[in-house]
Structure formats: C-alpha cells, structure tokens
Amino acid sequence: MSTWEDDKHLEFDIANALAASPLRVKAQGRSALKIVARAVIAHLKRCRWRLERLPPPEDFEGAP
C-alpha cells in the first residue's frame, strides 16, 4: 500500500473516531472533521511517527 493510500485510510479512521467521540468536536460537518484529521496526520509526521495498518486478528468475523 502506498503512502497516499495509508494517509487516506488514516484520515478516514481519525475522522470517524472524532465523529463518534463522546467529546463531540465542534465542527461544521464531515469536511471539518477531515480537515482536523489531516492536521493530526501532519502533526504525527512532523513528530516522526510511523503508523501502519495491521491485518485483522484471525478470530475477527467482521466484513472485509
């Protein structure tokens, strides 16, 4: 998976987590959550974090 795809997946995951958070983010819709997610990713990169998506556990029964 390329970096671009990894960043898009991470942006999607962060935006969904923000949307589902009990500490509701004051946002003007989904696009604002994506902007926040991109800022989080940019900050993690500046701090030299490297994140990778692992395969689901063997006993996971969710949709692929």
Image (cartoon, rainbow, N blue to C red):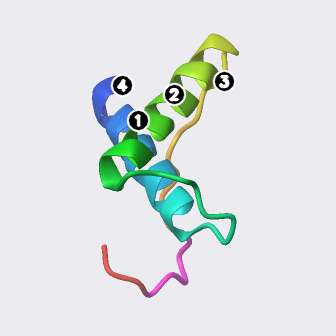
Secondary structure under tag 4 reads: helix
- Horizontal side of 54 relative to 34 (left or right) equals right
Task: Tell me the crowding category of disc 1: few under 14, some 14 to 19, or many 20 or more residues within 10 angstroms, Cα based.
Answer: some
Secondary structure under tag 1 reads: helix
Task: Tell me the crowding category of disc 2: few under 14, some 14 to 19, or many 20 or more residues within 10 angstroms, Cα based.
Answer: few
Res 3 label: 4
For discs 3 and 2, the disc positioned in front in the rendered view: 2
Nearer-N-terminus badge (2/4): 4
Q: Which residues are magenta?
A: 57-61
User: Would you name the residue on which mark 3 appears?
Assistant: 49
Q: Are marks 2 and 4 in contact (CB under 8 Å)?
A: no
User: Would you name the residue on which mark 1 appears?
Assistant: 35
Q: Are marks 2 and 1 in contact (CB under 8 Å)?
A: yes
Q: CA distance from mark 2 to mark 1?
A: 6 Å
* Residue in the picture at 46% in, 51% down: 27
- Horizontal side of 5 relative to 49 (left or right) equals left
